[in-house]
Image (spheres, helix red, strand yellow):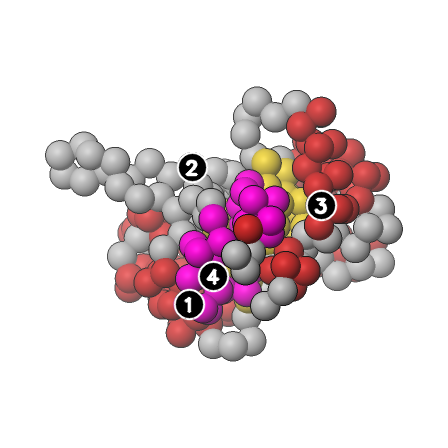
Amino acid sequence: MTKEEIAKMIDHTLLAATATKAQILKICGEAKKYSFASVCVNPVWVPLVSAELKGSGSAVCTVIGFPLGAEKSAVKAFAASQAVLDGADEVDMVINIGAAKDGDFSAVQEDIKAVVDAAKGAGQSAGKKALVKVIVETCYLTDQEIEASCLAAKNAGADFVKTSTGFGTPKDADGKPLPNGAQVRHVKLMRKTVGPEMGVKASGGIRDAKAALDLLEAGANRLGCSAGVAIVESWGR
């Protein structure tokens, strides 16, 4: 895989609460230089990023229900629709994690479908195809819950399942922090569950080319990371 090929699999991401206009413009410039798959930002920045990336070939990606997934479905759906109308091509939504922990995967699926329908409806109105990626936040879920959440996303018509927000705060019984990002074993499980027709996005803690390659070999076909430039620059060394 060449540097150009790996770049086209990266969502170049800046989701910090402290992100400034200058920083957003900087990552847009990097996306145009390296031809990243997309620039992923919080919804408030979508109009700016849409204008900056116009004609570049890089998509505009944003997040919905981020990072907790705890908004009502109608709120998530409205936010997704508005984001697409503002210029987003892709929306990455967080599932109702509490419902997943309760084993209520009908509620998980209904929540996802509300966003899928809203985003795709807005995309149709705007004359484009909107993609929906579903963040299952693997750090909080058992393998069985991950599988069921992925199937809910598939049944709801989503385009991708995604590992993590990168903002999760899981802890063990003693209060020690646990990993909160993409793990190879979770990506393998997600790919096995959804099959070859859906996308799998790995995100959270992907900081170098080796980590990126391991996740791609595990079955991911999109990577969400803030270290995209470093990964591309070091690719193949």
Of residues 106 and 48, the one nearer the viewer is: 48
* Residue 68 visible at all: no
Indicate which disc residue 213 carries.
4
**Label 3 CA crowd tier, 10 Å (few <14, some 14–19, many 20+):** many
- For label 2, the residue is 167
81 sits left or right of 95 in the view: right
**Residue at numbered disc 3:** 31
Q: Is residue 12 left or right of residue 122?
A: left
> In the rendered structure, which amino acid carries the disc numbered 4?
Leu
Inspect the magenta stretch and tell me whether residue 218 lies in it.
yes
Real-space Cα distance between discs 2 and 1? 22 Å
Label 1 vs 4, first from the N-terminus: 4
Q: Is residue 116 left or right of residue 201?
A: right
| Residue pictured at 71% horizontal, 41% vertical | 30
User: Which amino acid type corresponds to the residue marked 2 in the rendered image?
Assistant: Phe
**Lower position in the chain sequence, tag 4 or tag 3:** 3
Q: Which residue is mark 1?
A: 218
Residue numbers of the magenta segment: 208-233
Q: Mark 4 or mark 2, which has the lower sequence index?
A: 2
Few, some or many C-alpha atoms within 10 Å of disc 1 (few <14, some 14-19, many ≥20)?
many
Relative to 80, does residue 153 appear above or below in the rendering? Answer: below
